[in-house]
């Protein structure tokens, strides 16, 4: 691996003390960055430098650094999770950037995702949506033998595609309406595609959509930015599937 | 050494197969109408915590959950890739509960408690049923039935999986069950909270103190029982496959309040991780063990080899695992695979620029199965490998090397999962109970969910009913809560006041190097003594020279890290101490002085067929090593052989 061509970068980073105060873009220059470092490791290096100078390090969310926990976020040069397709920020490597490049780093922005500090945001709204119906109502101990529920392989694969969502919020951040349709439809689809989830499918889609609206997420206008920015490649066909289910549920609604 | 206690694991009497059934009958029950009067705190929302919280809430208990991330769904269980074991025997290849039990006991090198392991094997089948019912999209065959694959340490296919994201799917299943209860208003979920103290009142765990990592506020929560589902302490090594926030602090607080810490030296070094490549590196990334189903491990026969992997002819390659262990081949248990990789690197036969790596080659599998099949099996892992290393594993062999992955040690618990502090329970990786000295692949998910879905719901009820806590609520105004809050606040203030010159991470890295060099894959008495001295020195330096910027108010990530690293600096010493006293090799604990002629781990069953349970005696004081004897009534202790 190449380690001799170290990078110097100009960073423009959103700094905001807390939820109440106004934020601003602050410029930093950093050098000696290995192309093999991940984007977050580059920020670690910046933070080590800031700490050594007695300054407040940049707060950003991250945890597993394997692209699966969904904790990391960041708008990098205006793109959720940066320029590489189907890649979370933690799996984005500095070899994708040029020496001397200017990189703008901002938090995911949406009314439903308030900034807590710098690049850290509050995504509790996603938990609230799941709590409104993103589950199968089956208590522990109620299950029959797993092979008693047969699932066509094709449906199992489609359900798995939808279930791959990591709940990072890139779809919301990249949507001009800050819509959560891709996130919601992924869970609705996963469960609607499986026999286990069929029984409650109509109630589920109604409840989750109305919770999404209530929390301040916008509407879907079919721009597909969500799909383009999704680090797990969740397809917007899930939104179409959800819309069908929603319509059918609304037509059959007893209230 | 006059104070050594012999711990009682409270294993029920009777035949191994009947113990759990009989115990469930003998345990006391809490009347359904009374359950809501009991408050239960669950710390950590991974597989163990989420499954326990959801199930206890379904039963009617008043449950609160706490996690340090922004959502319960982020817990590091999510990163488990390969699968979850169960003895369903769907493939009809000879599996049974007894075989799963036997493989797990043997895989753990006969250092786990028989009755716990048998119970684990028994309830594993229920886990698969439960998860399938929740809508976990397990891999399926064309007929719609569940698919299985093989994993290390077993000769049957008993691993259920959801692509390379099984942990994610099982956790999201448990999380959805938890959110179902949150939605009903039956569980209160506290996020971005770190447990900073365990509160003990009249000898019983009655609550916790948390620090809100967004506001910096300290909060008091009282309860009738506290469940620690806080994972392992692999991050003591700084570089590991653990998540950045994974830490040992909750368990460590419990240790200091009287919960004994069992077998801290049992750490699992996972054989297939992407090798380290720079000093800036923040963590190591695992490549699932499932890859060893199709990948072949090799190194060049000639240690002066300079050609690229694909240019080295077949006869000049050393497929050392297949050669040495013909029956298990590339699917030997993790500790064996890891140690053999280290031996090759130590002999100078390692590959890549650093020479601390071995090849994991898929060329034969691609030729045999076709690239599409391999892509379907491992596509996401191959993509991850390419993103990190900039090399295409469909074309060149992966380079892998062992890295710290899991800790088998943890808080000592009895058969009921209760620690030595009454009312304080430990579940999942946070306890020590089921994996002995080495965990088999796909068994962590099994254990976390077994503890949460199927064990604690019974044993917790028995504790609450037996203790008669029903009308003895402890209020958060009790002096013990104020005292605990004051202690933690003072600790954080002290960390901020040092204002030294070195960053928190620099101390953590320093500790990690000592741990890896002396308490890693090969340990010696001399090295371990050196480690203890070095760790003490780093710790002293830390409390004099650490620099924590910012204040206690609001978000302060450096302060959070400093608190955890301060604990790692104590925990690391205990790990070294435990490794030093365990004068044998077993599973992941390999002492150079104790090996067979073929360099395999050599146990000393006469002297060490026991659990070491360490008891805290005060800061900077030597802890006491108590023991729990392990009695094997159903399996014969033999030298493990995978040949």
Image (tube, coloured by chain):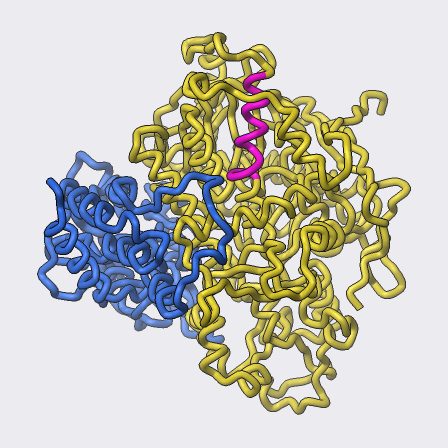
Chain colours: A blue, B yellow
Viewer-closest of B50 and B318:
B50
The residues colored magenta run B451-465
Q: Is residue B147 magenta?
A: no
Q: Residue sitting at 51 percent across and 40 percent down?
A: B48
Q: Is residue A68 left or right of residue B361?
A: left
B358 displayed left or right of A136 = right
> Where's residue A161, x and y in %?
34, 64
Report the label total. Answer: 0
Q: Nearer the viewer, residue B218 or B413?
A: B413
Residue B14: image location, x then y, percent? 77, 33
The answer to whether residue A10 is left or right of residue B547 is: left
Residue lying at 49% horizontally and 46% vertically, measured from the top left = B505
The main secondary structure of the magenta stretch is helix
**Which residue corresponds to the image point at 49% horizontal and 44% vertical from the top-left?**
B47
The residue at 21%/62% (across/down) is A241
Q: Is B278 placed above or below B576 here?
A: below
On the question of residue A97 being in view, the answer is: yes
Dividing the picture into quarters, in which one does residue B151 lie? bottom right
Q: Is residue B389 visible?
A: no
Percent from the top left, x then y, of residue A121? Answer: 26, 44
State the residue in front, A176 or B468.
B468
Residue B309's spot in the image, x, y percent? 60, 84
Q: Is B311 located above or below residue A182 in the figure?
A: below
- The quadrant of the rendering that contains the N terminus of chain B is top right
Residue nearest the viewer, comparing A33 with B200: B200
Instruction: Identify the image quadrant of the C terminus of chain B.
Output: bottom right
Vertically, is B284 above or below B483?
below
């Amino acid at each position: 691996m190449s380690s001799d061509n170290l990078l110097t970068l100009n960073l423009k980073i959103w700094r905001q003390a807390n939820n109440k105060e106004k934020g601003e873009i602050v410029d930093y220059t950093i050098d000696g960055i290995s192309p093999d470092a991940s984007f977050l490791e580059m920020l670690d290096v910046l933070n080590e430098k800031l700490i050594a100078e007695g300054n407040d390090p940049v707060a950003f969310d991250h945890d597993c650094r394997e692209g699966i926990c969904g904790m990391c976020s960041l708008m990098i040069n205006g793109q959720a999770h940066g320029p590489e397709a189907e890649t979370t920020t933690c799996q984005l490597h500095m070899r994708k950037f040029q020496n001397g490049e200017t990189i703008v780093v901002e938090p995911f922005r949406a009314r439903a995702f308030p900034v807590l500090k710098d690049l850290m945001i509050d995504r509790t709204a996603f938990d609230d949506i799941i709590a409104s119906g993103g589950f199968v109502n089956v208590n522990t101990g109620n299950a029959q033998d797993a092979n008693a529920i047969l699932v066509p392989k094709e449906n199992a694969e489609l359900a798995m595609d939808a279930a791959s969502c990591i709940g990072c919020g890139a779809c919301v951040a990249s949507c001009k309406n800050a819509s959560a349709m891709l996130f919601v439809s992924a869970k609705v689809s996963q469960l609607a595609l499986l026999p286990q989830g069929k029984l409650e499918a109509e109630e589920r889609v109604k409840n989750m959509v109305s919770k999404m609206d209530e929390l301040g997420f916008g509407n879907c206008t079919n721009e597909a930015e969500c799909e383009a920015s999704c680090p797990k490649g969740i397809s917007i066909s899930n939104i179409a599937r959800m819309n069908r289910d929603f319509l059918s549920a609304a037509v059959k609604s007893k209230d | 050494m006059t104070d050594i206690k012999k711990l009682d694991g409270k294993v029920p009497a009777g035949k191994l197969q009947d113990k759990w059934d009989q115990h469930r009958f003998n345990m006391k029950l809490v009347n359904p109408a009374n359950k809501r009067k009991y408050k239960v705190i669950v710390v950590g929302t991974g597989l163990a915590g989420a499954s326990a919280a959801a199930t206890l809430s379904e039963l009617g208990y008043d449950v609160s959950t706490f996690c340090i991330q922004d959502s319960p769904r982020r817990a590091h269980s999510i990163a488990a890739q390969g699968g979850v074991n169960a003895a369903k025997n769907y493939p009809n290849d000879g599996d049974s509960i007894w075989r799963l039990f036997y493989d797990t006991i043997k895989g753990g090198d006969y250092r786990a408690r028989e009755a716990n392991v048998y119970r684990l094997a028994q309830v594993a089948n229920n886990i698969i049923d439960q998860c399938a019912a929740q809508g976990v999209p397990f891999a399926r065959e064309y007929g719609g039935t569940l698919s299985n694959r093989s994993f290390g340490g077993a000769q049957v296919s008993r691993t259920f999986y959801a692509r390379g994201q099984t942990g994610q799917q099982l956790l999201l299943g448990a999380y959805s069950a938890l959110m179902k209860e949150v939605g009903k208003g039956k569980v209160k979920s506290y996020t971005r909270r770190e447990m900073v103290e365990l509160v003990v009142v009249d000898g019983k765990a009655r609550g916790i103190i948390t620090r809100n990592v967004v506001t910096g506020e300290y909060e008091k929560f009282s309860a009738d029982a506290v469940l620690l589902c806080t994972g392992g302490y692999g991050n003591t090594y700084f570089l590991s496959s653990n998540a950045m926030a994974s830490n040992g602090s909750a368990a460590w607080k419990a240790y200091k309040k009287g919960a004994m810490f069992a077998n801290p030296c049992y750490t699992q070094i996972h054989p297939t991780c992407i090798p380290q490549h720079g000093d800036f590196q923040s963590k190591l990334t695992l490549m699932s063990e499932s890859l060893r189903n199709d990948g072949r491990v090799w190194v060049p026969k000639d240690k002066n080899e300079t050609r690229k992997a694909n240019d080295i002819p077949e006869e000049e390659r050393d497929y050392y695992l297949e050669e040495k262990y013909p029956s298990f081949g590339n699917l030997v248990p993790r500790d064996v695979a890891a140690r053999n990789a280290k031996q090759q690197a130590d002999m100078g036969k390692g590959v890549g620029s650093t020479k601390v790596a071995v090849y994991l080659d898929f060329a034969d599998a691609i030729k045999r199965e076709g690239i599409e099949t391999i892509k379907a099996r491992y596509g996401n892992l191959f993509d991850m490998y390419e993103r990190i290393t900039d090399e295409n594993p469909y074309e060149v062999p992966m380079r892998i090397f062992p890295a710290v992955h899991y800790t088998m040690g943890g808080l000592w618990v009895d058969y009921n999962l209760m620690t030595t502090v009454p009312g304080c329970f430990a579940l999942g990786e946070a306890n020590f109970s089921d994996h002995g000295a080495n965990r088999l692949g796909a068994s962590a998910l099994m254990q976390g969910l077994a503890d949460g879905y199927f064990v604690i719901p019974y044993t917790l009820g028995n504790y609450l009913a037996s203790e008669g806590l029903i009308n003895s609520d402890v209020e958060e105004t009790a002096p013990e809560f104020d005292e605990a809050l004051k202690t933690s606040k003072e600790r954080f203030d002290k960390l901020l006041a040092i204002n030294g010159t070195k960053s928190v991470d620099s101390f953590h890295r320093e500790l990690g190097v000592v741990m890896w060099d002396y308490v890693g894959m090969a340990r010696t008495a001399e090295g371990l003594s050196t480690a203890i001295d070095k760790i003490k020195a780093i710790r002293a330096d830390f409390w004099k020279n650490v620099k924590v910027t910012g204040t206690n108010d609001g978000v302060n990530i450096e302060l959070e890290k400093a608190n955890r690293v301060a604990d790692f600096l104590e925990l690391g010493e205990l790990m070294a101490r435990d490794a030093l006293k365990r004068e044998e090799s077993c599973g992941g604990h390999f002492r150079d002085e104790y090996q067979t002629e073929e360099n395999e781990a050599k146990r000393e069953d006469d002297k060490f067929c026991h659990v070491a349970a360490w008891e805290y005696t005060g800061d900077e004081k030597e802890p006491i090593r108590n023991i729990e004897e392990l009695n094997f009534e159903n399996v014969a202790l033999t030298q493990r052989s995978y040949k």
